[in-house]
Image (cartoon, helix red, strand yellow):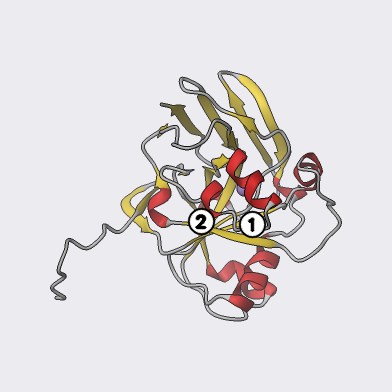
Amino acid sequence: MTDFIISAPKQVGINITGTDKKFPVRRVYCIGRNYADHVSEMGNDPKKESPIFFQKNPDNIDTSGTFTYPTETSDVHHEVEMIVALQSGGFNILEADAYNHVYGFAVALDMTRRDLQSAAKKGGKPWEIGKAFEHSAPMGIISPMEQVGKMQSGSIALSINGEEKQKGDLNMMIWNIPMMIAFLSRFNKLQAGDIIMTGTPAGVGPVHKGDKITASIDGLTTLEVVVV
Ligand code: MN
């Protein structure tokens, strides 16, 4: 066993329905601008162009049921998204082969420091400071694909304190799951443990301390998160 000079970081794991075993997370990829109605609400042209990918850190994942309001911002937005968890990977995966690499799916939130992201966009700077921060990826429980199917359609929605804010359908994705896996694997070697956050429908907006966020996708375990 390797002897490290300081304690090695903990492996992040996500719960799975029907087992005590966890899904070990390697990388967290996120696709931007993947539902046309959300592309429009952010002031961009939804006409199909190459997809935008950015990353969060595995230890930004929070499965505690709380979201700790971050520092250095006054405008944190919710984005409800489905995640795809990969059980294998590779370079140059074909669309026709993409689902063979999928382990399962879960509901997640791509929490965003919108003020910092907007400033970065304006300055032509990277988005990380607006996207990859502590607790920025609240995540629910993974359902294996063998139980829930390919998740190509179905309602995706988010409400705050019982009031509906986001509502869409998985079939509204501009880049569907095989397309995004194929595209991403041209640039990065996907591997077991990688997660892809698949984008958000329209209706994003701010959250505040005390809010109760309910994020749901037909067929998956609902994610409930309290902002603290
Ligand atoms: Mn997003």
- The residue singled out by tag 2 in the image is 104
Q: Is residue 77 visible?
A: yes
Q: Is residue 211 above or below residue 66?
A: above
Query: What residue is rendered at 34% in x and 55% in y?
Result: 12
Which picture quadrant has residue 128? bottom right
The residue type indicated by label 1 comes to: Ile
Q: Quadrant of the N terminus?
A: bottom left
**Within 8 Å: ligand 1 and the Cβ of disc 1?**
yes
For the image, the number of numbered tags is: 2
Residue 83 percent across, percent down from the top left? 55, 52
- Describe residue 132's horizontal placement relative to residue 62 as left or right: right
Q: Quadrant of residue 115?
A: top right
Q: Secondary structure at mark 2?
A: strand
Q: Residues within 10 Å of mark 1 (few under 14, many from 20)?
A: some
* Circle 1: element type: strand
Residue placed most toward the observer, 197 or 120: 120
Identified at 60% across, 58% down, the residue is: 126
Sequence-wise first label, 2 or 1: 1
Q: Between label 2 and label 1, give the one nearer the viewer.
A: 1
Q: On screen, 96 above or below 73?
A: below
Residue 209 coordinates in the image, percent (x, y): 47, 23
In the picture of the structure, the residue carrying the numbered disc 1 is 31
Side of 10 where 167 appears, left or right = right
Q: Amino acid at mark 2?
A: Gly
Q: Going 62% across and 70% down the picture, which residue do you hit?
A: 184
